[in-house]
Structures are given as structure tokens and as C-alpha cells.
């Protein structure tokens, strides 16, 4: 990369609080060694290594004069990205729910989601795993609604004090809807509802409502 | 029956939406390229002849370089292990060990998961009561996990002697998780603070304190128990 601004500041660490210890003048080049969050570790022609900020790296140019571009983790990334990870808390049929999910986007609108949850209630504890599709409407909006559909497993572990406790592991199916709203940088808030149908071995299927709210980030 | 219909109907709607977004690109691709009519071509060739530029004196023989930027090595993941002391309320303080993994989202925030295990000691009631055993051996195992969001603040440097400086940072952390103890699993809220020193760019040493709070009715009435933990850990960035 070639420095096109008057100078490029190098810091001792990957953060705005670390001191500037070296300055690369205009027209000199730097090599990118690695990247951590929004900071680039670069090596100058003289072999000095330091950390440069993302906003300054966006102003450097390649040898052919074209600007150096990369995934900057901004609003454009919210609309179109590959991976998502999130954490949320909520309610699963009356029990407290802790849930994480990861998603892989096939295109800005369609993603495959895997979610792992644990619910802790007064009558029973349990774990769920869900795999499904999420369809995002209007991904370029700051708050975009989505619908989900998928299948999973629930493993219920009733508390031992109850009469005739039975450990159950059943297949489930779910449909759901939610909203994701962009916060800042790589973060967004995600609120979601899922209606689960548990295919029990008894005569009746069970229905469980799941509500959750949490944060997620994309990369 | 009604539920199945609802599921079926919503499934159909989702598939339709997903399908539309996926095949939207295909439809564009099939569009025929705009045809240039022969008359247009004739007109444009005449115009070219009329406005033919003067022949160049020097033909530049510069080979245009095409630059391909190699994939940048990102180091946002931090994985490691820790060891410390966990004070389980009413059950004494015991050693704890665990593993942790973190993903640094921005320079300020990181997402961290921890899984740890400790073994509870005896309550004072058990010690004074002679042969009384409140819990069996298995039930004394305290296993927890927590999923937290951390915030880095006060970045700085630690100086070792004259010629060595290491980056450091404090962080606050808070999260949710569960603790399995005395034959039951409970929803746990945890919060704490830590200090991270990086001897090199990829290695970090952590010192942290964390409180894991949950509601317990193990000893009579239901109450919130605080389980303070002090930990020392080593993590590697990659």
C-alpha cells in the first residue's frame, strides 16, 4: 500500500489509546502483516512495524493507484455479509432461555441459521438445537424484519422432585418472525419469536412459544 | 390440525419469498443483450472515419500491472485456559479451572464464552454436624458456562526494565449462562473485570475477577447466591 495522505500514523497497539511512535511519510509504501478488528499491523520499507487505523488505511492506494478496499464493518456490511453470531435471553414456554445462534448468508436475503439454546425452568430444564432458514425482508433498511422456518430437537430434563419424571428427546419444527435493527459498527439488535411444534411420542403434539431478545454481530 | 395448517401456510410463504430472492439474479441473466441495428453500425463507422485521431508518435509499451490483494490475515479470535479460585457461597473456596474463547468484534467490544469446573467443599453445618452429608460426590461438582460481552477500556503499556514495553488493557465483562450444582442447573448472571497484558502480539496473560450470581434454594429458603471467582489465564490470538 502507498501512503497518499500527508502521513500515516503507526501506534504501538491496536487501539486508539495506544501512543503513536512512528510516522510514514507520503509516497512511501507499507506491507500489511495482519489485521485485528479495525486495526492493521503494517511493516514499512525500513522494517518498522506498527498498527494503523482502518480509516487511515482506507486512504492508502495500491501500486496501480487504485484505493485499497476491504470489509470495513459498517452499515453496508449490515445489509450484506457472510457470517453472523449472536447471544440472546428470553422465554421458552415459561422457562428462562439462554440462546446463541450462528448464521451463514447465501445472499443478502436468505441465510441458514443454527441455534443452540438452554432453558431453565421451575418444572424442567432442557436444551434445544434448531436448524433452519431465515428470510430477511428489506435488508438495506436500518430495521429489517425476517421470517424463519426450520426443524430441531428438544431435550427435556424434568426436575427430579416431580412425579414420574421422564427424560424426553423429541423432534420439533418451528416457524418464526423477528426484527433486526442496526446499532453501530458491526452490531445489531435482534428480537425474535418462534412457534415450536414438538412431535411427542404421545397422542398430542405440544406447542411451545419462544421469545427472545439479544444482540448479534456480523463478520 | 389447525397448527399444522398454520405451519404449512407459513412454510409456503417463506419458500416463495426465499425462492424469489434467489432466482431474481437468474432472470436478469437471461435478458437478451441490446441489439445494434445495421443502420446504426453503418452510421457509427462513418463517424469514426471522420473523427479518426491523429496517429500517435510514440506507442507506450507500458505493461499494465494487475494487482491482486492477498487475503489479509485477521486475528480476532482469542482462545485459552485459566485457573483460579472460586468461592461457592456456603461451600467454601476451591480451585477452579476452565477454557475460554473470545471473538474481538471491534477494538472496544468482544464476545466471550467460558466453561469452568470446580468442586464444592463442606458447609459449616456439615463440618459441625459430624456425619451429615448434604451432597453426594457428584453433586459437589460445580460446572458452569457463561456467554458474555466484554468492553475494553484504559488501554496502556506495561514497562519491564529499560527496553521492553508490553501492551495492556482493562476490561469489564458481563453475561449470562448456567451453573450446574447440587443436582440442579440454574440460570446465572455473571459480571466482573479483568486485566490483559500482551507480552507479544499473539499472546495474552489475563487476571480477572468475576461474580456468578444465581438463585438457590439449597439451604432452606430461596436466595441469591454470589460466587466470586478470581482467575489467571493465558490466551493465544489467531
Image: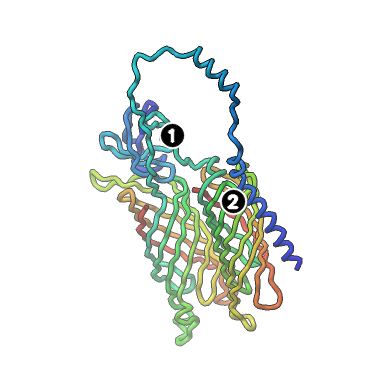
Number of the label disc, if any, that sits on residue A110: 2
Q: Nearer the viewer, residue A54 or B97?
A: A54
Q: Earlier in the sequence, mark 1 or mark 2?
A: 1
Classed neighbour count for the residue bearing mark 1: other residues with Cα under 10 Å, few (<14), some (14–19), many (≥20):
few
Q: Are marks 1 and 2 on the same chain?
A: yes
- Label 2: which secondary element: strand
- The location of residue B176, given as percent across then percent down, is 53, 61
Quadrant including the N terminus of chain B: bottom right
Number of the label disc, if any, that sits on residue A11: none
Q: Mark 1 highlights which residue? A: A58
Q: Nearer the viewer, mark 1 or mark 2?
A: 2
Give the chain letter at badge 1: A
Which residue is located at x 40 percent, y 68 percent? B96
Q: Nearer the viewer, residue A172 or B129?
A: A172
Classed neighbour count for the residue bearing mark 2: other residues with Cα under 10 Å, few (<14), some (14–19), many (≥20):
many
Q: CA distance from mark 1 to mark 2?
A: 30 Å
Position of B109 relative to B211 (above/below):
above
The quadrant where residue B130 appears: bottom left
Q: Nearer the viewer, residue B9 or B65?
A: B65
- The location of residue A115, given as percent across then percent down, is 56, 61
The quadrant where residue A37 appears: top left
Amino acid at each position: 500500500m502507498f501512503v497518499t495522505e500527508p502521513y500515516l500514523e503507526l501506534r504501538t497497539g491496536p487501539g486508539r489509546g495506544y501512543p503513536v511512535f512512528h510516522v510514514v511519510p507520503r509516497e512511501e509504501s507499507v506491507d500489511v502483516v495482519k489485521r485485528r478488528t479495525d486495526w492493521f499491523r503494517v511493516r514499512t520499507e525500513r522494517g518498522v512495524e506498527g498498527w494503523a487505523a482502518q480509516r487511515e488505511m482506507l486512504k492508502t492506494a495500491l501500486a496501480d493507484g487504485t484505493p485499497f478496499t476491504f470489509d470495513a464493518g459498517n452499515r453496508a456490511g449490515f445489509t450484506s455479509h457472510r457470517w453472523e453470531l449472536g447471544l440472546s435471553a428470553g422465554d421458552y414456554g415459561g422457562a428462562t432461555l439462554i440462546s446463541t445462534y450462528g448464521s451463514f448468508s447465501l445472499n443478502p436475503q436468505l441465510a441458514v441459521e443454527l441455534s443452540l439454546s438452554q432453558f431453565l425452568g421451575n418444572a424442567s430444564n432442557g436444551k434445544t438445537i434448531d436448524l433452519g432458514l431465515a428470510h430477511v425482508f428489506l435488508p438495506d433498511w436500518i430495521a429489517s424484519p425476517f421470517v424463519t422456518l426450520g426443524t430441531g430437537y428438544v431435550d427435556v430434563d424434568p426436575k427430579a422432585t416431580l412425579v414420574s419424571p421422564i427424560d424426553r428427546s423429541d423432534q420439533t419444527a418451528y416457524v418464526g418472525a423477528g426484527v433486526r435493527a442496526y446499532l453501530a459498527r458491526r452490531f445489531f439488535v435482534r428480537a425474535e419469536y418462534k412457534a415450536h411444534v414438538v412431535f411427542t411420542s404421545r397422542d398430542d403434539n405440544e406447542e411451545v412459544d419462544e421469545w427472545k431478545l439479544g444482540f448479534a454481530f456480523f463478520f | 390440525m389447525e397448527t399444522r395448517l398454520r405451519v404449512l401456510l407459513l412454510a409456503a410463504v417463506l419458500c416463495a419469498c426465499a425462492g424469489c430472492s434467489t432466482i431474481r439474479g437468474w432472470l436478469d441473466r437471461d435478458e437478451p443483450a441490446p441489439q445494434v441495428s445495421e443502420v446504426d453500425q453503418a452510421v457509427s463507422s462513418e463517424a469514426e472515419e471522420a473523427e479518426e485521431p491523429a496517429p500517435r508518435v510514440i506507442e507506450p509499451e507500458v505493461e499494465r500491472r494487475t494487482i491482486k490483494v492477498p487475503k489479509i490475515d485477521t486475528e480476532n479470535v482469542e482462545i485459552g485456559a485459566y485457573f483460579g479460585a472460586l468461592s461457592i457461597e456456603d461451600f467454601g473456596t476451591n480451585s477452579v479451572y476452565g477454557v475460554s474463547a473470545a471473538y474481538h468484534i471491534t477494538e472496544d467490544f468482544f464476545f466471550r464464552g467460558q466453561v469452568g469446573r470446580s468442586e464444592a467443599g463442606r458447609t459449616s453445618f456439615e463440618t459441625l454436624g459430624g456425619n451429615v452429608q448434604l451432597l453426594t460426590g457428584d453433586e459437589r461438582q460445580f460446572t458452569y458456562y457463561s456467554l458474555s460481552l466484554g468492553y475494553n477500556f484504559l488501554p496502556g503499556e506495561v514497562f519491564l526494565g529499560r527496553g521492553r514495553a508490553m501492551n495492556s488493557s482493562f476490561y469489564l465483562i458481563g453475561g449470562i449462562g448456567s451453573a450446574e450444582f447440587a443436582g440442579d442447573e440454574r440460570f446465572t448472571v455473571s459480571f466482573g473485570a479483568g486485566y490483559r497484558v500482551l507480552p507479544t502480539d499473539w499472546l495474552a496473560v489475563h487476571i480477572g475477577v468475576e461474580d456468578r450470581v444465581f438463585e438457590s434454594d439449597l439451604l432452606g429458603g430461596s436466595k441469591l447466591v454470589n460466587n466470586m471467582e478470581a482467575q489467571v489465564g493465558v490466551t493465544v490470538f489467531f
